[in-house]
Image (spheres, helix red, strand yellow):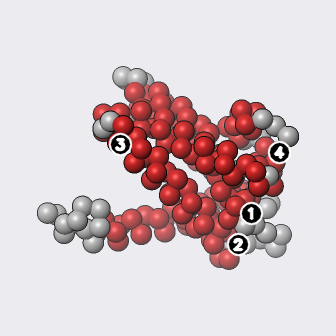
Amino acid sequence: MQSLTERMIGAAKLQVPTYEEVEHDRGATGQAALIVVLASLAAGIGAIGGGGIGYLLLNAVAALLGWLIWAALIWAIGTKLLPEAQTEADVGQLLRTLGFAATPGLLRIFGIIPVIGTLVVFVVSIWMLATTVIAVRQALDYQSTLRAVGVCIVGWLIQLLILGLFVGSGGLSGTAPGM
């Protein structure tokens, strides 16, 4: 079994055996949560213009909640709506693989660097998209990477719809839209 650091490097390098290992290691759920929190804190520091320690803590809590919701959503779409014949997964498997897929997000801390920070965050975002697709493909036991991309797109669209309904109802600001 690989160490946490070796797993993080393997996940960042898109190594399928690493995703398979964490998928099946129930003990890796805490490690995955740690990565999600650290990546969230890195993103918060990289964009520190938005606030102080309260902002960072809120960002970490939001990241954990988003990770839980994303894993459940991807599980439902991937196992119920778009499964392949061999698809068999539980939410825990998705939590672990998606958590490790957040590893490149640690580099978002460099978003704080003037001029190149925005480029770094953009590149890391693309990298995280790739790690997420691999995580989904492996957790759902897909043969098709394209199907994993489709599941991610459907999940993303559903999240946008829900967020749009929430924001449109004034749920985030407590006021009516346009106020």
The image quadrant of residue 45 is top left
Which residue: 69% across, 37% down? 8
**Can residue 38 be seen at all in this image of the molecule?**
yes
Q: Circle 3 is placed at which residue position?
A: 55
Residue 63 percent across, percent down from the top left? 49, 51
Residue 128 percent across, percent down from the top left? 58, 44
Q: Do the residues under discs 2 and 1 have CB atoms within 8 angstroms? A: yes
Give me the disc on residue 140.
1
Q: Circle 2 is placed at which residue position?
A: 79
Question: In 3D space, how far apart are the residues under numbered discs 2 and 3 (Cα atoms)?
Answer: 35 Å
Q: Nearer the viewer, mark 1 or mark 3?
A: 3
Judge by depth and name the residue closer to the eye, 31 or 21. 31
Crowd class of label 1 (few under 14; some 14 to 19; many from 20; radius 10 Å):
many
Q: Do the residues under discs 4 and 1 have CB atoms within 8 angstroms? A: no
Eyeballing the image, is 170 above or below 131? below
The image quadrant of residue 127 is top right
Q: Along the horizontal axis of the image, is 105 left or right of 17? A: left
Which residue: 60% across, 42% down? 35
Q: Do the residues under discs 2 and 4 have CB atoms within 8 angstroms? A: no
Eyeballing the image, is 110 above or below 8? above
Please identify the quadrant where the N terminus is shown: top right
Sequence-first disc among 4 and 1: 4
Question: Judging from the image, what secondary structure is the residue with disc 1 in?
Answer: loop
Residue 65 percent across, percent down from the top left? 50, 58
Judge by depth and name the residue closer to the eye, 60 or 23. 60
Sequence-first disc among 1 and 3: 3
Question: In 3D space, how far apart are the residues under numbered discs 4 and 1 (Cα atoms)?
Answer: 14 Å
Sequence-first disc among 3 and 4: 4
Q: Amino acid at mark 4?
A: Pro
Q: Along the horizontal axis of the image, is 117 left or right of 152? A: left
